Amino acid sequence: MTAVAPTRSSTAPTSPVTGATGRLPGRHGVNRRGPWLAIVYWVVIAITLVPIVYMIVYSFNDAPTNRLSFAWNGFTTYWYANLVNVSGLGQAFVTSVAIAFLAALISVAIGLPLALALERYRFFGRGAVNAVVFADIAAPSIVVGSASLSFFLSIGLGTGFLTVLLTHVAFDVAYVVVVLRARIAGTSRALEEAAGDLGATPFQAFRLVTLPLLAPGMLAAGLLALAMSIDDYVITSFVAGPSVTFPLFVYGAAKAGMPPQVLCFGTLVFAVGLLVALLNGALNRRLTRTRG
């Protein structure tokens, strides 16, 4: 006897209780809810992109007064060729970049063991540490800045580069911990245990197994800390003292007339961030194809 394969019916399934024919959900059922979600999405994208597009376009504007103008006076690359001709602008940008990189590195170095401890172990005071991490994220910037300034004054530490760095590390660590905890929660300890069964010491297992697994999360956490540090104004304004970061310079320059070079620096920062994002996407696609 030859077995006959059942044919695939194109009709909708019938309910065993009522006998009514059910309707299969369409592949594009989400679009039947109306266009409002798409409209809101594109409105938000437009609101986000308009200032960026304005910044890029007017960084090439020929401003005869050497001050930012809303009137288009012609295309020029003069401001890019003379980026550091504005007194104090180049130094302020270098200061911001240095603080941001140092704050990101220190925050990841502190946040990694803290995230491992909070995610994998139970210890006395764990709840309090979690509360402190949450409070650091939820606290308004003006509260963090004023509290940091009060602390530095109480211990006699003068404000400047060091106090800005310490304050940035303090609020960056909480975000680093959150990102790394999410990464740690998605990894299994089976590979570490297997490395131990094969004779690896705990440090070797951490260095050769755990650290490579957490590397993408560490990179993401470091980039987040870098971005938050390089553009912070409110907290920095409390503890900067004589040091001038890029956001502080921009705020001060806006009162007397902003030089076009500010837009050039902003465009370059945006271009670097976009390049990093594109490279990360290309790397992820390549890894996906390799593993597939």
Image (cartoon, rainbow, N blue to C red):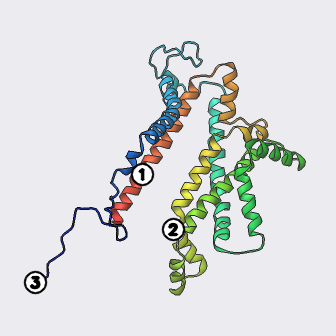
Residue found 49% across the figure and 33% down from its top: 49
The residue carrying mark 1 is 281
Q: Is residue 245 left or right of residue 77?
A: right
Q: How far apart are marks 3 and 1 (CA)?
A: 52 Å
Q: In this view, does 82 lie to the left or right of 135?
A: left
**Amino acid on which the number 2 mark rests in the picture:** Leu
The residue carrying mark 2 is 213
Q: Are marks 3 and 2 in contact (CB under 8 Å)?
A: no
Residue 120 tag number: none
Looking at the rendered image, the disc whose residue lies closer to the viewer, 3 or 2, is 3
Question: Which residue is the extreme one toward the left?
Answer: 1
- Which callout, 3 or 2, points at the residue further toward the start of the chain? 3
- Which callout, 2 or 1, points at the residue further toward the start of the chain? 2
Quadrant position of the N terminus in the picture:
bottom left
Above or below — where is 73 with respect to 281? above
Looking at the rendered image, the disc whose residue lies closer to the viewer, 3 or 1, is 3
The residue carrying mark 3 is 2
Report x, y in % for residue 126: 74, 69
Q: Is residue 193 left or right of residue 24?
A: right
- Circle 3 crowding by C-alpha within 10 Å: few under 14, some 14–19, many from 20: few
The answer to which of 136 and 35 lies nearer the viewer is 35
